[in-house]
Image (cartoon, grey):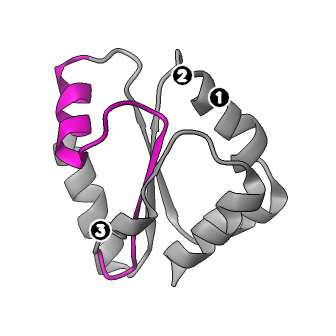
Amino acid sequence: TVADLKTELAAAKANKTPVMLDFYADWCVYCKQMERETFSDPQVAKLMDEMLLLQADVTRQDDADKALQEHIGIPAPPAMIFWGADGVERRHLRLLGFMGPEEFAPHVREALQ
């Protein structure tokens, strides 16, 4: 939910921890491809270990799911949203759609800076 996200982001900011929010749905083919090919890549996994990883499962597309998507401003999954250790969203790093590990690893590295 939007409230859950705000709580998690506030805690991460207090701990100076970068955050990645992954919008996922069971019916999303590219979401499953990201998990299978990109997130499981050893280089990507190592980088992602340095951040708080949140996943919004918007499979049901209920009111709470739609409100969260609207709050963030994404049309549909897959989408990866990043916040720095300062709690500020790195809007230029937003990803919509599939990205392979070779392209994704440098992207995550930049999010960690």
Query: Circle 1 is placed at which residue position?
Result: 32
Say what secondary structure mark 3 lies in: helix
Report the Cα–Cα distance between label 3 and label 2.
29 Å
Q: Residue at x 24, y 17 (%)?
A: 62
First in residue order: circle 3 vs circle 2: 3
Three-letter amino acid code at the position of disc 3: Ala
Q: Which residue is mark 3?
A: 11
| Nearer mark to the viewer, of 3 and 2 | 2
Q: Earlier in the sequence, mark 3 or mark 1?
A: 3
Residue at 53% from the left image edge and 67% from the top image edge: 51
Q: Is residue 35 left or right of residue 28?
A: right
Residue 28's tag is 2
Q: Residue 100 placed where, x, y %?
A: 72, 48
Looking at the image, residue 6 sits to the left or right of residue 83; the answer is left
Q: Please state, as top left, top right, bottom left or bottom right, where the N terminus lies in the image.
A: top left
The mark total stands at 3
| Residue 2 to residue 92: above or below | above
User: Residue 61 at what x, y percent from top left?
Assistant: 30, 18
Horizontal side, residue 98 vs residue 87: left or right: right
Give residue 37's quadrant in the image: top right
Answer with the quarter of the image where residue 79 lies: top left
Q: Which residues are magenta?
A: 62-87
Marks 2 and 1 sit apart, C-alpha to C-alpha, by 7 Å
Q: Where is 34 relative to 16, above or below? A: above
Residue 45 shows up from this direction: no
